[in-house]
Amino acid sequence: MARRNARAGSKRNVDVEGFIGISSRFAQLNKLITRDLNNNTSTPTFSLYSKDDIQTYLSNPYTYEQQLRKAVTYIYGASSHFRRLIQYFVGLSDLAYVVEPYKIDPKKANTKTINNNYRKVLNLLSSMNIKTQFPKVLTVCLREDVFYGTLWVTNDSVTIQQLPSDYCSISTIEGNVPNVTFDFSYFDSNSALLEYYPAEFQTKYRQYQASRMTRWIELDSPTSFAIKCNSDILDYALPPFAGLLRELYDIEDYKQMKETKTALENYAMLTMKLPMEKDGTWGIDLPKAKEFWRNLDSVLPDEVGSVLSPMDINKISFEKSNTGDTDTVSEAEQHMFSAAGVSSLLFNNEKASSNALLLSIKADQAITYGIVKNIQDAINRFLQAQSYGKNFKVNFLNISQYNAKEAGDAYLKAASYGMPTISYYCASQGLGQAELDSMSFLETEVLGLQDMFRPLQSSSQISSDDLDSTAATDEGGAPKKELGEVSDSREINSEEE
């Protein structure tokens, strides 16, 4: 399928509206094809790495970058503890954002132009489906450290396509956003996948074929970008929770040990001792003793063994005493969360403390918010490359399900004092700017809900001038209570009066 390049104009000035109409074929691209199942020639492979392998990889993360990435990817699918940990950090941001003016002089700005461009910015951000697409980016960053992506842009959607991490690297930073350098030798063995990438890849793959010396070619920005969790280490990818791999293996080891210990405790052994007289002779004939022993052994279950011995047999046990006995699996799980820097109070700990839990969540939320700000830089770089978006920027709020009420109350209080925080309050409550005035228009102008749903009126809600003259009285005090609404002592006092 032939596709036109999504970049019209210079590298730093990409006009979405300009290149949308270039090709009708490209405009019809409303879905992203990732693979052809009828001609699928590649399948993912997984390997169970040993604890010694993990130790070797962590000793030199630069050399074993790919192995570490594959190890954490495997553990993410195999360990419910690791998956839950990653999903917990992803959920520490609901990606609420506000579009703010950028480099605008309110005294000189043209209101009509600003409003038109503002609407185009909102439409662009709505087509990106930020709250559904970018949690996937957060997941990859928290799992593997780096997300490499490129954009498919159409007239009604902006879709993010993840690039194979083993063939991507970072060599330059532009506009505070790392650019992606791609190893085009990837398509030597995956030529069937080339048509599922933007036209830029086809052009640069031909460039690579003309000169095999240039395997690594930088992709065009701002349509391609990299989001890195450990932004202070750009030379290689280091999964943020790679150090937990050893603790995760310990959990599985302790589970197997506990299972073996439980199985051994279910076994028992019965002993039959041959009686001996004082003169040293046996109290029973050996053949007869064997016959009794065989009769006993034939009726015992598989878990119970038997032995015939002339000597005393003592039990030697390696079990811990009941006092001070601990659950090694539970200890290993808590140690894993402690090694991650996360409070185990979050994961079914019986010693939960609400204050300690909230403080722990706030500390963890700062880690996720750092990645969200990197996403913000990538979106703003793409947004401000549009002709209508140069005077706007996106600001992601540090809000999650754990502090939405607290942040909302702060924005609402600021708005009550005249601060321009109405959009921030609505964003914190899940109502974006694109829906804010649209919902108000729908409910008031179209549906007239403000007139349809009127509360019942009472004397406590209207003034005395609006009351009927016949209903007004000169009697003061509260209305008289009916029988059954007063206490027994009050009823007695009323009768005496």
Image (spheres, rainbow, N blue to C red):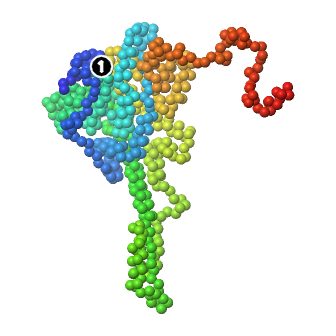
Name the residue that disc number 1 marks. 155
Location of the C terminus by quadrant is: top right
Quarter of the image where one finds residue 211: top left
In the rendered image, residue 249, in percent from the top left (x then y), is placed at: 38, 51
| Residue type, numbered disc 1 | Asn
At 53% from the left and 61% from the top, the residue drawn is 322
- How many neighbours does mark 1 have within 10 angstroms: few (below 14), some (14-19), or many (20 or more)? some
Note whether 252 is above or below 27 in the view shown: below
In the rendered image, residue 95, in percent from the top left (x then y), is placed at: 42, 28
Location of the N terminus by quadrant is: top left
Determine the residue located farthest toward the front in the rendered image.
Answer: 483
At 46% from the left and 23% from the top, the residue drawn is 431
User: What number of labels is visible?
Assistant: 1
At 65% from the left and 14% from the top, the residue drawn is 462
Q: Is residue 208 visible in this depiction of the protein?
A: yes
At 29% from the left and 23% from the top, the residue drawn is 153
Note whether 338 is above or below 231 in the view shown: below
Determine the residue located farthest toward the left in the rendered image.
Answer: 210
Quarter of the image where one finds residue 292: bottom left
Q: Nearer the viewer, residue 319 or 489?
A: 489
Note whether 433 is above or below 105 in the view shown: below
Q: Is residue 233 visible in this depiction of the protein?
A: no
Indicate the secondary structure of the residue bearing disc 1.
loop
Q: Is residue 180 left or right of residue 195?
A: right
In the rendered image, residue 111, in percent from the top left (x then y), is placed at: 42, 9
Quarter of the image where one finds residue 189: top left
Note whether 339 is above or below 460 in the view shown: below
Q: Nearer the viewer, residue 132 or 96?
A: 132
